[in-house]
Image (cartoon, helix red, strand yellow):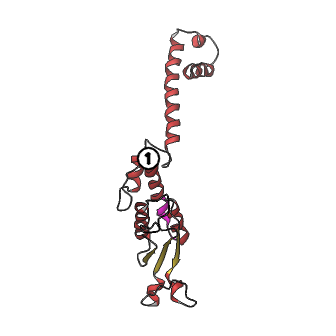
Amino acid sequence: MSAQEEQTRTLANYLPQGRAFAAKNIPGTVTREFLWGLAAELVRATALLRELREETLPDSTTLFLGEWEKAVGIPDTCLLGKGTTEDRGRDVLVKLASLGIQTAQNFIDLAAMFGVEVTVIAGSVHGCFPFKFPIIFFPNEKAARHTIIVDFVEPLTGGFPYTFPITFGLGTLAVVECLFRKLKPANVDLLVKNLP
C-alpha cells in the first residue's frame, strides 16, 4: 500500500459514519477522489517537514548551507565559505561557537573543531618566579598581563627531518590563528608560538 493510499484511508476513517459520508470508502466516488487528492498533499507536506527537520542543522545540511553562511557572516576575513560541504558546515559551526568565546578552554575547543591542538595560557605566567621555559620576556608587567600565549602542540614544520606521511595543513593553522586574533579581547595581545 502506498503512502497516499494509507493517508486516504486514514482521512476516510476520520469522517463520521452515516449516509452523508457513505461514499468515503467507495473507489471512484467524488468523496473518495477528494480524499485521494487531499492525501497527496498531506504526503507531500510530510516529506517537506521531514526534509526540513533533516536539513536544519548546519553541519548536516546541503540545502540551507548558503542561508546558514549568510546568517553567520561567511565569507569573512578568516572563513572564505569555500571547500567541501563538510568544511563549510564546520565553518558555520565555528562561527556559531565563536559567539561566546571567553576562556582559554573556549579557544582550545575552537581549535579542536579544526583538528588542531593548542595550549592557551596567560602571559603573566611568564612574568614572575618561578620562570617557565622557554622564558618569554615582556617590556613590563602590564604587557604580560594583557597577553595570551597560544602554543600549537604539534607544529607543522617545513624543514628536516621530515616525518612521513608529510602533512600539509598550514592553511588550517592560518585560519585558526586568524580566528584567534579576531576573537581575542580588544585590550589583549596574542603571541603565537610553534607556527612553521
Main secondary-structure element of the magenta-colored stretch: helix
Residue at the image point whose x is 40% and y is 66% from the top: 178
Can you identify the residue that label 1 sits on? 85
Residue 18: image quadrant is top right
Q: Report x, y in % for residue 44.
A: 49, 28
Which residue is found at the position 48% from the left and 73% from the top? 150
Does the magenta-highlighted stretch encompass residue 149?
no
Give the farthest residue toward the right: 17
Total tally of numbered discs in the picture: 1
Residue type at numbered disc 1: Thr
Q: Nearer the viewer, residue 99 or 193?
A: 193
Other residues around mark 1 within 10 Å, as few (<14) / some (14–19) / many (≥20) = some
Nearer to me, 10 or 66: 66
Q: Does 8 appear above or below 119?
A: above
Element under disc 1: helix
Q: Is residue 157 above or below residue 60?
A: below
Residue 113 in the image, given as x and y percentages of width and height:
51, 59
The boundaries of the magenta stretch are: 96-102
| Between 191 and 42, the one nearer to me in the picture | 191
Q: Is residue 101 magenta?
A: yes
